[in-house]
Amino acid sequence: MDANDLAALRCRPTSGPTLDAGEVARHVAVLPRWAVVDGQLERRFGFADFHQTMAFVNAVAWVAHREDHHPELLVGYNRCTLRYSTHAAGGLTLNDFICAAKVDALLP
């Protein structure tokens, strides 16, 4: 499965089981800009200004609403950090990687 395959999937209404270390490693390998940090899938984004940052945040909000799977966001003037983890499952699930791939597809 590659990043396009992940982005084409839809999140499950129930998060499903957490992924084992091998599954996490396979999914991170196809999303090279993401890393697992403290048990969460994380990526930092940089932008030219606040306007671009907020446009990105709004696009992420649209993805989150559509998939009913919401990241943690840390937003600054020209940067945003996203963190995905499925709290209901107590770790990383396929839903986290699906949303990360959809977010990656937002940017060139």
Image (cartoon, rainbow, N blue to C red):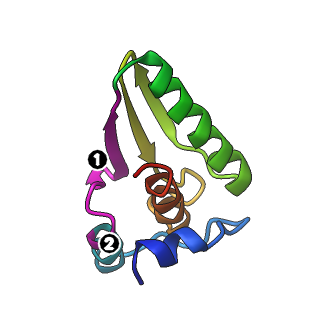
At 49% from the left edge and 52% from the top edge, which residue is drawn?
103
Residue 35: image x %, image y %? Answer: 27, 54
SS at circle 1: loop
Instruction: Verify whether residue 24 appears in magenta.
Output: no
The reply to whether the C-beta atoms of the residues labelled 2 and 1 are less than 8 Å apart is no
At 46% from the left edge and 56% from the top edge, which residue is drawn?
100
Mark 1 neighbour density, 10 Å: few (under 14) some (14–19) many (20 or more)? few
In depth, the one of 66 and 59 nearer the eye is: 59
At 46% from the left edge and 62% from the top edge, which residue is drawn?
101
Among the 4 quarters of the image, the one containing residue 49: top left
Residue 1: image x %, image y %? Answer: 42, 84
In depth, the one of 53 and 65 nearer the eye is: 53
- Residue with the mark numbered 2: 30
- Mark whose residue sits in front, 2 or 1: 2
Instruction: Verify whether residue 37 appears in magenta.
Output: yes
Q: Which residues are magenta?
A: 29-47
- 100 in relation to 77, above or below: below
In depth, the one of 98 and 37 nearer the eye is: 98
Among the 4 quarters of the image, the one containing residue 59: top right
- 30 in relation to 79, above or below: below
Q: Amino acid at mark 1?
A: Asp
Name the outermost residue toward the bottom. 1
Q: Considering only order in the chain, which callout, 1 or 2, is on the residue closer to the N terminus?
A: 2
101 left or right of 44 in image:
right
| Disc number for residue 10 | none
Mark 2 neighbour density, 10 Å: few (under 14) some (14–19) many (20 or more)? some
Among the 4 quarters of the image, the one containing residue 32: bottom left
Q: Amino acid at mark 2?
A: Val
Residue 3: image x %, image y %? Answer: 42, 71
| Disc number for residue 38 | 1
